[in-house]
Amino acid sequence: MKTNMRTALLASTLLMGVAAPAAAQVAQGPESPTSQTTGEPEADADVITVTGSRIARPDLDAPSPVTTVTAEQFNLTGTVTVETLLNELPQLIPGNTRVSNNQGGESFSTLDLRGLGPQRTLILIDGERVSASSVSGVVDINSIPTGLIERVDVVTGGASAVYGSDAIAGVVNFVLKDRYDGAELTAQYGINEQGDGATFNIQGLIGGNFNDDRGNLTLFGGYSTRAAIGQGSRRITTPASVLIYNDAGTDSEEDDRIRVANPLELISAGNNDSLYANGGSATPPWGQVSNNASNPFRNLSTLLPGTFAGANTDCNPATAGVNVNSGTLSFNDAGQLSPYFGSGLCGYAVRSTGSSRYNFNPANLLQTPLNRLLLSSTARYEVTDDIVLKVLANYVDTQQTVNLAPTPATGISVPYNSPLLPADLRTALASRPNPTAPFTYARRFSETGPRVGIYDSTTFNIRGTLSGKIDDNFRWDATLSYGKVDSLATSLGNINRTAVAQGLNGCPTGSLPGCVPVNIFGANTLTPAMLSFVRIDTKEARTFEQVRAAANVSGSLFKLPYGDVQIALGGEVRTDRGAINVDDAQRTGNIYGFNAVQSQAGTINVKEGYGEIRVPLLAEIPFFHDLSLEAGARYSDYSTIGNLFNWKAGAQWAPISWMRFRGIYNKAARAPAIVELFQNGDQGFPSYVDPCNAGASRTAQALAICQGQTPAFAAAGGYADFQQLNSQVEAFAFGNPNLREERAETYTLGTVLTPKIGFGTLSMTVDYYNIKIENLITTLGAGFFINQCYVQNVSTACDRIRRNTGTGQIDAINTATGNQGTRRTDGIDTAVNLTLPFDQFGADGRLRVQEVFSWTRSYKLDDTEFAGRSSGGNGGAIPAYKSTLTVGYDLDRFSIQGRWNFVSRVIEDFGLPVNPVTPTLSYYDMTIRQGINDKFDLTLIVNNLLDAKAKRTPNGYFDQGGVDTTWYGPIIFGRSYTVQARVVF
């Protein structure tokens, strides 16, 4: 009876893989070597430990819902980087991926359960905490040895009582092969249909038993590469998008008031009166001379008639030219001083039409290149009949590169008498009321080529565990682990601020060695000698290490009429140390280009103790086939925040053998990470839209606040036709040593159905989840504070925003970290797993169908609802519905599998009565595997089978190339093909 129930319940959890361990051989062609993952020697075959608890139990009956992805699914989908497959699970919102890292953040891939942030998803290997990969406390998922994965368990909902801090959203547990016997070699190559973005992976796995099978050693090695794809290689991301505002929008969501526009398509459509936000950058290679409202240029059409009289200021050949006497200035392609053409159709960054704006898209990457070497080993040895030693060692060497447009240098102060000034600019400066005042200049140093960031990282982890029996009822284990990450970030293509200033002044006494006069007035004016003087490369070294020791005891405390009362007790201590060391150029901010970073360091010491108990109350009577309760608690002592107490309580009730109800309540917490405590004013440049921009969308309240911030500029009429010059704003992020822990309440309620259908197996699960996090540790984005200030009129938010008193432009925003706000989410997860062996009908093979579906009913930040919406201020899209359907048919040496991924559309939250929509995402993948003989098989994988297309959306304006790459990441490159060959020895 127990064995049948265990098999049925296991089938209900292996929703993304195969139905049960006995059926794990899925048309693989070669006969696979054997592998087991039972954690204890000579353990009862029906007693296992389920992710989410440390109590070994007779069957998979944990009250927390578990979704499992098997090794076979990694093989059938050709998964090399783990996040590619796992991010398709409905419970996950994509974190950093191959298409998002070019914008900043961590330089590695992450997992994000429920969209609550990767720092709230705890990563485990074989049920043990994994050392973080940076001072943010987040784990690089690509450091997991893919070829060693036996399965991945995903548990959603708080699990802090079992595993400690960071498990507010849940845990992802990678269970590795630890008794592998055999050898195999796998190679695969993938490429997009357009012939770029190639991926290559080769990996080998070998393992065997020794000393009369008392020991096993398994070795894994893999090397993979991923080629870069530039935004300029795709038509959809090549042009710089603009946002179009339609004040006459209707109540239909499809009749969007804001939409994204491709300038190459709309340049002649006459949309100049409805621009909501310009395209590209206001800092071009041809330069920009800022106009100071209190010391303006005058009479330019008379002084310089060749370029200022009859100027085509709106880039529309159908309108007559006008005389320009003042305003912001630039240089034309002939190197002549001219008006800065940035309004009307000039808001489209198309240089050929006369626009002074710069399209940076073609210089940026859409897919970041990656090189990864991964070496891992697992070993186990039965020291005695009752004691087992297990060792895991893992080494990863990765290199990832980001590529950004050439350095934009803004806020350059130039003296009026600089010897480098061209004659026409001297004439314009002399027209000002105060002709001897310095002026502000901005210019993109295109001669240096793109800014390149190279991230080299090495990760080393080693863990040893001794486990054994105390007696027939109790077992023990003790673990000691050490993990360290060393990374070096090299930034190429920065510009030295001091060198630029000295070069503009003609190299006065005391200048840097090698100083030469630097001419930056106009495009392509820098000689090799000038470049050599102003260009500077920077380096940043990051380290993180964790030392951890843990011990556990578990077993049966005493017997009740319907089973054993089981407990688990344990404790752990760990120390996290992290440091960032930057060179002087970054520390002092003496660079234009990459963001300035400050050196920082911190240590967190933790001591913890926990306990769990499971009590069977009733069994094998009418309406009470099984009834059990369980509870757990964990006490933690942090050197930074003091004491934490987390606990859980759960129950299960099976009225009949094939129907089980389950529920669990958790009080969970997350302690602040090192960077949240000790960050030291790091610089960033987030995208934004200034509410003070002149136009139909500007409110009277926003205008009044802006005028109050810059009274002199307002008095000079500066806001009459005001437009922000840059689409990004400088922001400074600080840690907070006074942070408190995040507190969360989570609960899940659900049912598991495993009815007998006469042939095959069928299981269904439905679970409701509810998560509430208070005292949220977060650095709310620049857009959040802009909205609070100018829309909600919150004075403390306005205090964070610094406007330039002379130009009205936003200079910087302070986005300090704090415990600020509450986040809530709830919804329903459902899953169906069906396996039909056709031998019941005299045929061959079997059909397997797995469906995983998630409904996010609500997702709130404070009182603002984000479910079914997308907002940059909240970190991305939170779709209401996500679904993954997998259908496969397997024969002895042949398998075919199809996957349909569906994500419901989201409303893009711009705070308007009618908002734009990101349409539904739907795409299909297909796999065909053919075994050539008993030792060799070939697999063909076609991703995005029907070639679904990415679309330009308003939210994409704030992302990469006008496209929301997080949303469209799986299909943005079109259809792709992967060929895999595997040989078993």
Image: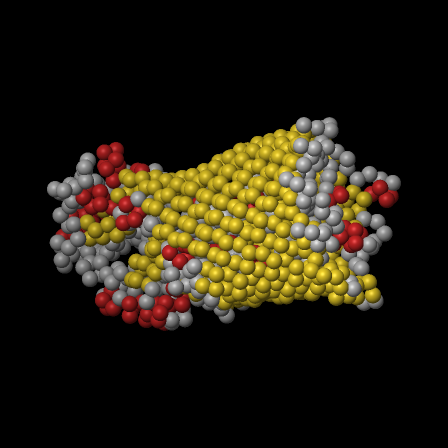
Q: Residue at x 51, y 42 (%)?
A: 461
Give coordinates of residue 25: x percent, y percent.
73, 39
Quadrant position of residue 90: bottom right
Quadrant position of residue 686: bottom left
Residue 157: tell me if it is visible: no
Residue 985: tell me if it is visible: yes
Q: Nearer the viewer, residue 320 or 828?
A: 828
Q: Nearer the viewer, residue 806 or 391?
A: 391
Residue that extends furthest to the right in the rendered view of this protein: 842
The correct choice, above or below, for 636 with respect to 973 in the image is below
Q: Nearer the viewer, residue 859 or 315?
A: 859
Q: Residue at x 15, y 55 (%)?
A: 437
Give coordinates of residue 975: x percent, y percent.
59, 40
Q: Nearer the viewer, residue 404 or 596?
A: 596
427 to the left or right of 405? left
The correct choice, above or below, for 771 with respect to 411 in the image is below
Give coordinates of residue 246: x percent, y percent.
46, 62
447 to the left or right of 940? left
